[in-house]
Amino acid sequence: MRILLTGASGQVGHELARRLRPLGELVAPGHAQCDLADLDQLRAVLRAVRPGLIVNAAAYTAVDRAQDEGALAMRINADAPALMAQEARVLGAALLHYSTDYVFDGTSARAYAETDTPAPLNVYGQSKLAGEQAIAAAGIAHLIVRTSWLYGMHGNNFLLTMLRLARERTQLRIVADQHGAPTWSGTVADASARLLGLALAGGAPWWERHGGLYHLSSQGQTSWAGFAEAIFSATGTACQVIPISAAEYGASAPRPANSLLDSGKLMALCGPLPDWRAALAACLAEAPAPGGSGQE
Ligand SMILES: NC(=O)C1=CN([C@@H]2O[C@H](COP(=O)(O)OP(=O)(O)OC[C@H]3O[C@@H](n4cnc5c(N)ncnc54)[C@H](OP(=O)(O)O)[C@@H]3O)[C@@H](O)[C@H]2O)C=CC1
Ligand SMILES: Cc1cn([C@H]2C[C@H](O)[C@@H](COP(=O)(O)OP(=O)(O)O[C@H]3O[C@@H](C)C(=O)[C@@H](O)[C@H]3O)O2)c(=O)[nH]c1=O
Ligand SMILES: [Mg+2]
């Protein structure tokens, strides 16, 4: 079976590529060869490759910038996945797609389940929700995996931002009134490969029974300030974290105060997910932190 992977240079895509290779013939065109903002090019790639499985790890992920680039975010995060679903229906292909905690408004007092009603606060979240809805409505074999607060040693993320800023500053002001579960891209890729392994072994009956929406994040919870403190502590980085409110930070995109996802449905099928602190340690053990002084 041929697998088309988009976003192979991103955090999740980078980790997914090597885990997908044993499952089929992997085709992973880059942004230039398959631009999700260019729907004609995307359609041509899908029709030329004729995959049995599409894995869409590409997305417009610049949350603040999306507030001013709504049309582009919608094209990449909603129109392109809608086209993938439409082409998948013609090809008889399955689709694995990723989404986000930012589809929720964060007002719940508990972790969000797949059955909770989304109400995004920002344009990025709105665009991701529209992508989910288009796929769910297409009547194809699909998995939509929502994750949260992704980090890793590859790509743009909070872990690498903190380590970079700590080289320039002795103190950092970090938001402490948004709560969530930092999730390693390696965790997402591992669990995704487990899900796909079950799906490919189970065939059409599996997709009918188990296809749909899954939440996938680390266990436990913290704030961005708590995550920063854990990063500095685990890497032996000397930098003081000053907790501030999101209002004081003043980002252009509003973000949910509660980003927690309940991953119970996925764990019942695929086994346990790690606690966020254990996953951070595993990530740092796999690759040395740039600029961290605790590794020597
Ligand atoms: N980052 C996070 O914290 C979270 C992410 N998610 C979701 O998880 C998924 C993976 O995110 P993540 O790995 O962090 O993404 P990254 O931002 O790390 O990578 C995005 C990928 O998409 C590609 N891409 C961007 N625009 C286009 C385009 N127009 N055409 C083709 N490719 C494009 C990028 O390629 P290039 O760099 O060459 O442009 C890159 O490979 C996404 O669906 C995201 O919404 C969910 C929750 C949290
Ligand atoms: C850099 C920095 C950020 N922050 C705050 C701003 C914000 O509230 C929080 C996180 O900021 P970031 O811009 O790193 O993260 P953000 O872009 O909001 O991350 C999100 O990305 C998208 C793609 C998702 O889907 C989400 O799950 C989530 O991971 O930390 C500080 O308080 N101090 C700082 O120095
Ligand atoms: Mg960001």
Image (cartoon, helix red, strand yellow):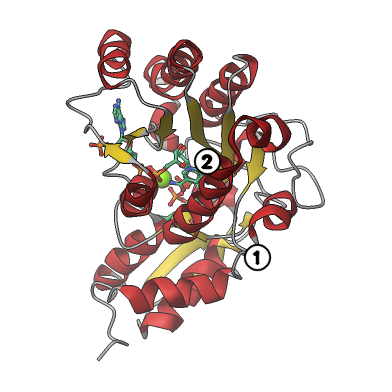
Quarter of the picture holding the C terminus: bottom left
Instruction: Please give the residue where the numbered disc 2 appears in the rendered image.
Output: 200
- 249 and 49: which one is in front? 49
Q: Given the image, on which type of amino acid does mark 2 rest?
A: Leu
Quarter of the picture holding the N terminus: top left
- Name the element at disc 2: helix
- 2 and 268: which one is in front? 2
- Residue 60: horizontal and vertical position, in percent? 38, 31
Q: Residue at x 65, y 49 (%)?
A: 259
Q: Mark 1 packing: few (<14 Cα in 10 Å), some, or many (20+)?
A: some
Q: How many marks?
A: 2
Q: Name which quarter of the figure residue 48 lies in.
A: top left
Instruction: Please give the residue where the numbered disc 1 appears in the rendered image.
Output: 272
Q: Is residue 208 left or right of residue 72?
A: right
Q: Classify the position of ligand 3 by quadrant: top left, top right, bottom left or bottom right.
A: top left
Q: Residue at x 74, y 46 (%)?
A: 112
- Residue 91: horizontal and vertical position, in percent? 43, 15
Looking at this view, name the residue that lies furthest to the left.
32
Q: Is residue 241 visible?
A: no
